[in-house]
Image (cartoon, rainbow, N blue to C red):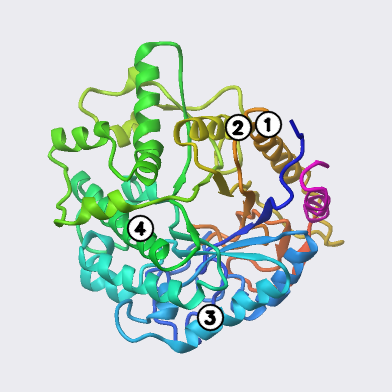
Amino acid sequence: MSKQLKKDFLWGNSVSSMQTEGAVNEGGKGPSVYDIREAGENTSDWSIATDSYHRYEEDFDLMKEMGMNAYRFQISWSRIIPDGDGEVNEEGLAFYDRFIDALLERGIEPMICMYHFDMPLTLAEKYDGFLSRNIVDAFVRYGKILIDRYKNKVKYWLSFNEHDLFANPGITFRVAGVLNAEFSEKAMYQIQHHAMVAHAKIANYLHETTDCEIGGMVAYSPFYPASSHPKDTLAADLLDDFTNHAFLYTFTHGEYPAYFTNYLEEKGWTPIMEEDDLEEIKKMKSDWLAFSYYSSNVINGQNIPDGIPIMSYPKYGGEENPHLDRTEWNWQIDPLAFRLIMRDMYARYRLPLFPIENGIGVIEELPEDEQIQDDYRIDYHRDHIQAMKDAILIDGVECIGYLGWGLIDILSSQGDMRKRYGMVYVNRENHDLKDLRRIPKKSFYWMKQVTSSNGSKL
């Protein structure tokens, strides 16, 4: 068996629009829910981000120099349709025309994500985002506009970033654009269903009208049992099922798994469905399965009181893993879990895998000589890429590529510029924009070695 990755393996970068673009009042863009968030002590507002709206060609040149041949980015819904469901903003589409063409000119494969949590503000205020069925129709209309416009230039598509987060009680309302409603588990699963139906409609339209590819995506965070006690193992298995596999199973098989539907029925949380919802999901096809991976978790089932909803188990039973180092944001660094995830996903679903987010966020300051010696980032990516290669070359997993997260510094998901994932430093802080210069770090040159050797030199 060959011990090399396939020649067309994709190496690249992933971002969202609100964490990069800025220009919130330019190009006819309407406001999103992010645009009204105010800066805090350790967070920025979203008005400038890293100014990629004006600097994307410079960023693409750096990506090309790093040897990247793929870029997964998000199109801003409110830049295309300012109020989310009204008139189309041709100026916004023209911006992404230029954006995509600039990628293709550099030999970089574009991958479009349609939604990365920046709900158009008008839809959030009027409908409470994906809590309302109205948003399904609005999103599908928006998605079809993108497909019709870019189907001849873009092969790889995503509807939603990290679909499982729509069923995460800590953040579901935030990612779904809900501003006013009170949280409930029933509302959470209604949101999840609306997003799944919207994804199915988009996937079905794409497959009916193009030869492009699409897959569902989850934020995969595995759970280890804290001990060999059966309660710990059961808690870990239930969390893995409900945070990861309920969605991967549906993307693959076109139906919700029985353990998921039975649980919702037992709790009285079965979502309201329209007549053709399950038929749309049944028709759905995934060309591959995409996921993000950053860290693993540990769960102690013995500490979870009876009757606690499964998705709230970590609040009661979460523990630190004494065998792993942790980041400044308390995320456990666990490259071996990356291999374990890939082995398990491929064995279960037999679809190609596409890890499209991976990286380490670190507080960094620019020294006087402007040379950031980020060996910790090199170590992180080296270990994770090796784990991925082991899954591919030893375990036989079919994998499309490896995309790091924010490999040119971006605002974090909370708006914190201190949390830097990049191999290129962007010279700004939370409250001081400075000059926004792009400055390669040591890891930049290491990544050039990785990509130029197609992963053989780590």
Residue ID for mark 2 = 339
Residue identifier under label 1: 390
The answer to whether residue 370 shows anywhere in this view is yes
Q: Secondary structure at mark 3?
A: loop
Q: Measured from the top left, where is residue 414 in percent x and y?
A: 48, 58
Q: Nearer the viewer, residue 429 or 215?
A: 215
x, y percent for residue 88: 38, 85
What residue range appears in magenta? 442-458
Residue 443 colored in magenta in the image: yes
Q: Residues within 10 Å of mark 3 (few under 14, many from 20)?
A: some
**What crowding class fits label 2: few (fewer than 14 Cα within 10 Å), some (14-19), or many (20 or more)?**
many
- Tell whether position 448 is magenta: yes
The kind of residue on which mark 4 rests is His
Query: Label 1 amino acid?
Result: Asp
**What's the residue type where badge 2 is placed?**
Arg
Question: CA–CA distance between discs 4 and 1?
Answer: 32 Å
| Res 23 label | 3
**Labels 2 and 1: the sequence-earlier one:** 2
Tell me: residue 392, above or below residue 176. above
Measured in 3D between alpha carbons, the distance from the residue under mark 2 to the one under mark 4, in whole angstroms, is 27 Å
Of 158 and 374, nearer the camera is 158
Locate residue 1, reporting x and y percent: 74, 30
Horizontal side, residue 199 vs residue 125: left or right: right
Horizontally, residue 452 falls left or right of residue 19, namely right
* Mark nearer the viewer, 3 or 4: 4
The amino acid pointed to by label 3 is Ala
Q: Are marks 2 and 1 in contact (CB under 8 Å)?
A: yes
